[in-house]
Image: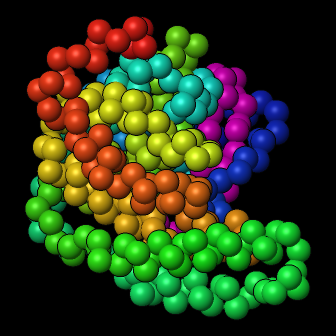
């Protein structure tokens, strides 16, 4: 296979865990290690488009790995009914968002903004009037009720069963309390091509703290840009306890994004409202954590929902604060930005 790229294999390939069940390997060659990825036939058109975009981002100087062209000039090579792409092996380590200084948070937000700006430059305009379906609180509440039926009641189970029941009842109460806070189906918002899964698991850092690679481009999608900013911040800077979101880091991140791809405070607040609501109505993390079912989704810990519901007004203001003049004049003077 590697000879299709003019490379000679050194040693046996090392199988790696791939996203969405795809097979992938770390392969040794006479020119160093590479990353080989397999795709199923139905994915080819989408993958070629992805390769075109990541190649353009790489050419623009952004830390995105472009697939290597084979000797034929193609980046997608077919063999035995499957397609393969080869990438440089990326160096660097993972870092959680809470490990970053405020300055690094701002730089990361700016990087996401630069990605959005370049994606807008190299792609055709995306339809501006997107209908974004809104989850229904009643549907989520019905799912919670069904889960409660599976949990032993009246002291008939374990302590974990009791905790499960308490968490489910907590979510049921929140759904009832905030049922009238559903966001609208259609909102005026800047839309475009998005990374789709911008979080710590898809970022690699050098020793100096700079990002060496943004991975995870299989999630490439279209949608509101502000939505990706808010989702990324919520995943990067969520604490694993009752502290909820690290608001200072969130604001640094949004401030950095504004420097590269300005939106407006209204779009950010609408995206915060929708992200909170979708987490409130997403019961997959509860199924996974307390009932052991697959499909926890991409929204992180269920415990954040209670904190966010209590702090909804505060988060609406906090996410939008970097778009105020008073905020933009002050944060860089904070020693935490060092």
Residue at 76%, 47% in the rendered image: 15
331 w.r.t. 111: above or below: above
Please tell me which residue lies in front, 224 or 142.
142
Report whether residue 17 is seen.
Answer: yes
76 w.r.t. 204: above or below: below
Residue at 39%, 13% in the rendered image: 337
214 w.r.t. 123: above or below: above
Q: Classify the position of the C terminus by image quarter.
A: top left
Q: Is residue 172 found left or right of 125 in the rendered image? A: right
Tell me the magenta residue range. Answer: 23-47
Q: Position of residue 139 (x, y in %)?
A: 45, 87
210 w.r.t. 141: above or below: above
Q: Is residue 119 found left or right of 150 in the rendered image? A: left
Q: Is residue 48 found left or right of 114 in the rendered image? A: right
Report whether residue 50 is seen.
Answer: no
Q: Position of residue 111 (x, y in %)?
A: 33, 30
Residue at 58%, 83% in the rendered image: 144
Task: Name which quarter of the figure residue 279 lies in.
Answer: bottom left
């Amino acid at each position: 296979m590697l000879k299709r790229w003019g490379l000679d294999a050194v040693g046996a390939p090392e199988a790696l865990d791939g996203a969405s069940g795809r097979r992938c390997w770390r392969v040794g060659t006479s020119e160093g290690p590479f990353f080989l990825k397999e795709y199923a036939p139905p994915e080819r058109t989408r993958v070629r488009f992805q390769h075109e975009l990541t190649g353009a981002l790489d050419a623009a100087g952004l830390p995105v790995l472009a697939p290597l062209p084979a000797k034929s000039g193609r980046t997608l090579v077919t063999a035995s009914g499957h397609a393969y792409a080869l990438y440089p092996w990326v160096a660097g380590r993972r870092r959680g968002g809470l490990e970053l200084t405020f300055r690094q948070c701002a730089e990361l937000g700016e990087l996401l903004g630069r990605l959005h700006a370049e994606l807008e430059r190299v792609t055709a305009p995306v339809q501006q009037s997107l209908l974004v379906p809104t989850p229904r609180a009643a549907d989520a509440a019905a799912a919670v009720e069904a889960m409660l039926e599976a949990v032993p009641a009246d002291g008939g189970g374990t302590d974990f069963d009791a905790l499960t029941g308490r968490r489910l009842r907590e979510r049921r109460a929140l759904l009832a309390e905030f049922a009238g806070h559903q966001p609208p189906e259609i909102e005026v918002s800047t839309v475009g091509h998005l990374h789709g899964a911008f979080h710590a698991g898809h970022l690699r850092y050098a020793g100096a703290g700079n990002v060496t690679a943004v991975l995870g481009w299989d999630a490439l999608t279209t949608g509101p840009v502000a939505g990706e900013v808010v989702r990324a911040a919520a995943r990067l800077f969520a604490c694993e306890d009752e502290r909820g979101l690290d608001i200072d880091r969130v604001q640094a991140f949004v401030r950095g994004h504004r420097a590269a791809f300005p939106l407006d405070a209204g779009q950010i607040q609408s995206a915060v409202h929708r992200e909170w609501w979708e987490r409130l109505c997403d019961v997959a993390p509860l199924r996974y954590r307390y009932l052991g079912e697959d499909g926890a989704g991409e929204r992180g810990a269920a415990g954040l929902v209670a904190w966010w519901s209590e702090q909804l007004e505060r988060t609406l203001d906090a996410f939008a604060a970097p778009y105020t003049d008073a905020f933009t004049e002050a944060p860089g003077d904070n020693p935490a930005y060092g």
